[in-house]
Image (cartoon, grey):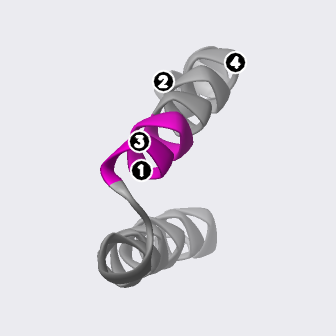
Amino acid sequence: MSELENQLSFNLLMIGVKLNALKEVLSDKQLEAYNNYIINKVKLLESDIRKL
């Protein structure tokens, strides 16, 4: 695995950990808003992510 792939894998793992932690403290409405924020950011980066 390249360094970039390792960084991406680590970052995705950390996102999962953070989301699980947020589920414990945020309301359903707040989680939905945060989820929508992440989806929008992913859409912006989608072409770059595909290049990987």
Instruction: Tell me which numbered mark, 4 or 1, is placed earlier along the sequence.
Output: 1
Q: Contact (CB < 8 A) between labels 4 and 3?
A: no
Instruction: Tell me which numbered mark, 4 or 3, is placed earlier along the sequence.
Output: 3
CA–CA distance in space, label 4 to label 3: 23 Å
Amino acid on which the number 3 mark rests in the picture:
Lys
| Nearest the eye: 43 or 26 | 26
According to the image, label 4 marks what residue?
44
Tell me if mark 2 has few (under 14), some (14-19) or many (20+) residues whose alpha carbon lies within 10 angstroms of its own: few
**Residue 34 magenta-highlighted:** yes
Q: Quadrant of the N terminus?
A: bottom left
> At x 60% / y 21%, what residue is drawn?
40
Q: Contact (CB < 8 A) between labels 1 and 3?
A: yes
Q: Position of residue 37 (x, y in %)?
A: 61, 33
Under circle 2, the secondary element is helix
According to the image, label 1 marks what residue?
31
Q: Nearer the viewer, mark 4 or mark 1?
A: 1
Tell me if mark 3 has few (under 14), some (14-19) or many (20+) residues whose alpha carbon lies within 10 angstroms of its own: few
Tell me if residue 27 comes above or below residue 49 in the rendering: below
Amino acid on which the number 1 mark rests in the picture:
Leu
Amino acid on which the number 4 mark rests in the picture:
Leu
CA–CA distance in space, label 1 to label 3: 5 Å
**Residue 23 magenta-highlighted:** no
Specify the label residue 29 is tagged with: 3
